[in-house]
Amino acid sequence: MNTELLGVIATYGLTLLLAIPLGRYIARVYKGEKHWSDFFLPVERAIYRLSGVDATKEMTWKQHLKALLTINLVWFVYGFFALLFQDKLPLNPDGNAGQTPDLAFNTVISFVVNCNLQHYSGESGLTYFTQLFVVMYFQFVSAATGMAALATLFVGLRERTTQTLGNFWMFFTRSITRILIPLSLLVAFILVVRGTPMTFDGRSTVTTLEGAEQQITQGPAAGMIAIKQLGTNGGGFFGVNSAHPLENPDYLTNMVENISILLIPIALVFALGFYLKNRRLAWTVFGVMTTGFILFVAGSITAERNGNTEIAAMGIAQPMGSMEGKEIRLGADASAMWGISTTVTSNGSVNAMHDSMTPLSGTLQMLDMMVNSFYGGVGVGFLNYFIFIIIGVFIAGLMVGRTPEFLGRKVEAREVKIATIIALLHPFLILVATAIASYTNTHHGDAAWTVQPANWLNNPGPHGFSEMLYENTSSAANNGSGFEGLGDNNFFWNFVTGLVLILARYLPIIGPLAIVGLLAAKKVIPAGGGTLRTDTGTFGGLTFALILILAALSFFPALALGPLAEYFGMAH
């Protein structure tokens, strides 16, 4: 076993060691139990008072959704105009221009929905003001929105009949003050110590070894990088994201940032077990998610270690594996693990260029986002998985001839219909958007608003198709990473991915909360001898198979046209 693989194992092992106690802590925060973090209470009360919010008032699932959607609309309006006129706002020492309306539309949606798809270059596309008070602000509140939605689900699954599911504003505020801010301060401190800048100075001019002058962008980067990883946001302060040596200076920061990507999504699974006092269920869910994660990581590491087959055919040795688009200071294994970590969650940050990875790694990264249920984004990851639990319970009930039940509540036609619609929405958005993009690329003269493929798609054949498929998959999964051979800063991609981002964010939140609201209002049925247990390995295996079968049936033809065709073409 080489040191690179040991680094991968150590990274995941440390994540798991931290996630279990963090999950216990998060459960106590959402339950409102007394804890060391109660010193935040005066701050939270001041926020409620200034906002005119009664955080003690119980809310129905419809009231939760109304609050969530209303505040998101407010953020959209604020962020759109701030980006549009950022050149006229303060904290712009480098003189960066305002964004165009279509780019501002795409950017603000992307950050409000926790995707952070960037059709601009980080250091030149934003000012310090919009980096801090639009992007970084949205990275906190969008992550907290998903966590508050999940906390609402926790309340609904407790063993009691109720019409109300806690208070959205309390869950939302505590997610920021007691979870995201403390963890972000810790991670930002580590990054600053290791060399990541945190300054308001403009560009520095340096003389290179060749004697030429070069301008180095800096800025308040460390704070944004901390929350982008912890909140599964992923937007880069710099254009090349965490492949930039100022965002990710060395192997230690690479481990810290990779742990940050996975930490809260895994901790929230354990928080479910602590909150419901059903740890077996949490471990079952964790087992399914982790099985998928480990299989994908192992596949990607193997592919990157084996190198590029076309280079090997030329008789050129690749002792470090496939290193195109990767940082030597990190290596192939750490880059492969990050590529899966960032796509198995809705993070989307990169420490290597995904467009340059081997076709099998690209396949696994896209499949991660197509499945969209292994760990997932903070909060919304389990909401997506919950949809498959409902479908799995229904199918298992049919198989054994019993009325489907989940945690003592009957799962009836309404819940199953909602779950099925949400499960099918994800492939529908990805495949329809990719079909439109493919048609537009080949019929670019048919409409005045389309763009020339020469400015749009830089690679022919299967890889060019993969770039379009990846962009739409990343948008639908609220991920934000991309195959960057695609020219995406134009009206078509800004508009189409913007619509995909909206639908893919809010409908998968509305659906699970509606299901939970319906289930919570039902009478709890005591478990009996014929009750189907959902906290067993058997049910976990059923759910895992259901997820993979749905993904295979939905996406295999598209993957066969793109990365798989490229792989077999290279092998031939």
Image (spheres, helix red, strand yellow):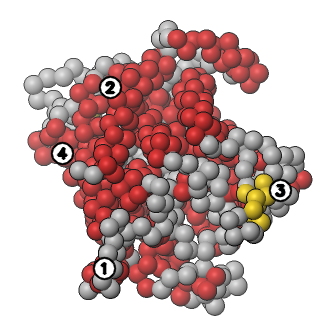
How far is mark 1 from mark 2, CA to CA?
Answer: 49 Å
How far is mark 2 from mark 4, CA to CA?
Answer: 19 Å
Which amino acid type is marked by label 4? Gly
Please name which of the two marks, 4 or 1, marks the residue nearer to the observer. Answer: 1
Please name which of the two marks, 4 or 3, marks the residue nearer to the observer. Answer: 3
- Asked where in the image residue 96 lies, by quadrant, the reply is bottom right
Q: Which residue is mark 1?
A: 312
Which of the two discs, 2 and 3, labels the residue nearer the N terminus? 3
Which of the two discs, 2 and 4, labels the residue nearer the N terminus? 2
Q: Which residue is mark 4?
A: 541
Which label sits on residue 273? Answer: 2
Task: Check contact, mark 2 vs mark 3: CB within 8 A.
Answer: no
Which amino acid type is marked by label 3? Asp
Which amino acid type is marked by label 2? Gly
| Residue at the extreme bottom of the image, as rendered | 445
* Relative to 94, 119 lies left or right: left
Label 3: few (<14), some (14–19) or many (≥20) C-alpha neighbours in 10 Å: some
Q: Which residue is mark 3?
A: 94
Task: Check contact, mark 4 vs mark 1: CB within 8 A.
Answer: no
Label 1: few (<14), some (14–19) or many (≥20) C-alpha neighbours in 10 Å: few
Label 4: few (<14), some (14–19) or many (≥20) C-alpha neighbours in 10 Å: some
Please name which of the two marks, 1 or 2, marks the residue nearer to the observer. Answer: 1
Q: Quick check: can you spot residue 371?
A: no
